[in-house]
Image (spheres, rainbow, N blue to C red):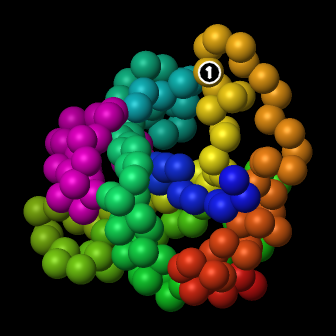
Amino acid sequence: MRNVYVEKVVVHMGVGEAGDKLTKAVDLMKTITGGTPVRSNAKQTNTTFGIRKGAPISCRVTLRGDKAETFLNTALGIVERKISENQIDQRGNFSFGIEEHTDFPGMSYDPQIGIYGMDINVVLARPGIRISRRSIEQRRLPSKQQVGRQDAVAFLKASHQVEVL
């Protein structure tokens, strides 16, 4: 019950506008992750960037299980298996970015598509997390069962050979 595991990996690609650019990002996300992207809408209007509230401006994919582990290993390889301790929050979740989609294996630069970056958010958990999320007899998770920053660092070093700076 003390083992830490990857609950989910969320890959987010923000393009800032709807239309052809977002369509290309969705297709690219499908190719890279193997999952089905969901479009996200702007939460507020920003006239400086020409963004209207409710307009689709990004896409994201949530990966779980073996797909999440495989994608995480590939993505950590791209960032040379180095994560800053500032990228890990108090709950043990961590995030990092990839500047160019062309860093992934099998992807090459296409002038018709351009270059897109992405954010990768990883959620870590321990068995028993369900008691805090279930609808019937929901309970608070004890602090010893929650994943902390030090647990996340130990997990990354042991299972993914990541150097935490």
Residue 78: x %, y % from top left: 42, 81
Q: Residue furthest front?
A: 1
Residue shown at 86% from the left, 50% from the top:
144
Is residue 63 visible from the viewing direction of this image? yes
Q: Quadrant of the C terminus?
A: bottom right
58 relative position to 27: left or right:
right
Residue 151: x %, y % from top left: 77, 66
156 relative position to 118: left or right:
right
108 relative position to 25: left or right:
left
* SS under mark 1: loop
Picture layout, residue 90 above or below residue 140:
below
What residue range appears in magenta?
A: 14-39
Looking at the rendered structure, the kind of residue marked 1 is Arg
Is residue 99 visible from the viewing direction of this image? no
Residue 32: x %, y % from top left: 24, 62
Question: Depth check: 93 or 64 in front?
Answer: 64
Residue 27 drawn in magenta:
yes
Residue shown at 40% from the left, 58% from the top:
68
Residue 51: x %, y % from top left: 45, 31
Can you identify the residue that label 1 sits on?
Answer: 134
How crowded is the residue under tag 1: few (<14 C-alpha within 10 Å), some, or many (20+)? few
Residue shown at 56% from the left, 24% from the top:
44
